């Protein structure tokens, strides 16, 4: 009898947009978190053992600005071909878990469907725009994690909402808001700064 002792976790990277496949040995997962890192260097998740037969997958989610703690039974995973991993708050697809070859087949199927949709009218410009929105959200999330987003009222506690045209920041203290447009130029500036100042006129500070 062949017992499958390796599970593959495939996650979409919010920085580069690629679907990265991580092969996880059931015997190698320890009680300390192990990082699952994208080929671009972005840390996508951590995995660790949780009890005798479970492991915990922890995913920082840029969609809902929270961290998802997902638990999987190793005995069940041995019989799973492929299942999708979702952000439960936004119902957004984060990736897959299951057999490596089944996930690869699913990825190729999605590519074929993607190409068909592109031929039906989805332009390369639209695809790049969607990627930029996620990259802007990811960078805003990084800056917020350092508490370097400031409002002119003096507060730095914000909410971030993902919109088709960008990321909408709202101050939890005074209610003022600022739209960070999802454009190539704004994204380049976000990578050059370590803070965002909500002024109602200019969204970003270049203070280093």
Image (cartoon, grey):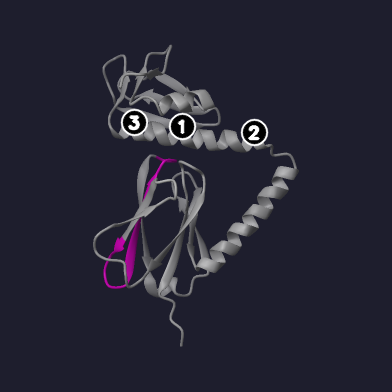
- Residue 60 placement, left or right of 188: left
Q: Element type at marker 2? A: helix
**As drawn, 90 above or below 6:** above
| Separation of marks 1 and 3 at Cα, in angstroms | 11 Å
Look at the numbered discs 2 and 1 and tell me whether their residues touch, using CB distance below 8 Å. Answer: no
The crowd level at tag 2 (other Cα within 10 Å; few <14, some 14-19, many 20+) is few
Tell me the tag on residue 125. Answer: 2
Sequence order check, earlier mark of 2 and 3: 2
Q: Element type at marker 1? A: helix
Q: Which residue is mark 1?
A: 136
Q: Position of residue 175 (x, y in %)?
A: 36, 20
Tell me the tag on residue 143. Answer: 3
- Specify the quadrant of the image occupied by residue 173: top left
The crowd level at tag 1 (other Cα within 10 Å; few <14, some 14-19, many 20+) is many
Q: Residue furthest right?
A: 120
Magenta region, residue range: 48-64
Residue 56 lies within the magenta run = yes
Nearer to the camera, 179 or 104: 104
| Separation of marks 2 and 3 at Cα, in angstroms | 27 Å
Q: Element type at marker 3? A: helix
Is residue 183 in view? no
- Specify the quadrant of the image occupied by residue 25: bottom left
Q: Please tell me which residue is depicted at 44% across the width and 34% down the height of the picture.
A: 137
Is residue 22 in view? yes
């Amino acid at each position: 009898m062949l017992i499958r002792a390796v599970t593959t976790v495939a996650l979409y990277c919010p920085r580069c947009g690629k679907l990265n496949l991580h092969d996880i040995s059931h015997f190698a997962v320890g009680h300390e978190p192990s990082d699952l890192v994208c080929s671009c260097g972005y840390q996508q998740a951590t995995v660790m053992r949780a009890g005798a037969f479970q492991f915990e997958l922890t995913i920082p989610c840029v969609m809902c600005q929270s961290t998802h703690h997902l638990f999987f039974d190793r005995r069940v995973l041995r019989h799973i071909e492929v299942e999708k991993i979702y952000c439960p708050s936004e119902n957004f697809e984060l990736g897959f878990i299951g057999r490596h070859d089944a996930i690869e087949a699913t990825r190729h199927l999605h590519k074929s469907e993607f190409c068909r949709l592109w031929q039906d009218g989805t332009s390369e410009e639209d695809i790049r725009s969607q990627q930029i929105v996620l990259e802007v959200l990811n960078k805003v999330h990084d800056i917020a994690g350092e508490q370097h987003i400031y409002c002119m009222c003096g507060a730095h506690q914000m909410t971030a909402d993902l919109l088709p045209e960008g990321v909408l920041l709202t101050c939890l203290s005074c209610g003022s808001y600022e739209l960070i447009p999802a454009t190539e130029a704004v994204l380049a500036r976000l990578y050059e700064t370590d803070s965002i100042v909500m002024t109602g006129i200019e969204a970003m500070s270049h203070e280093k």
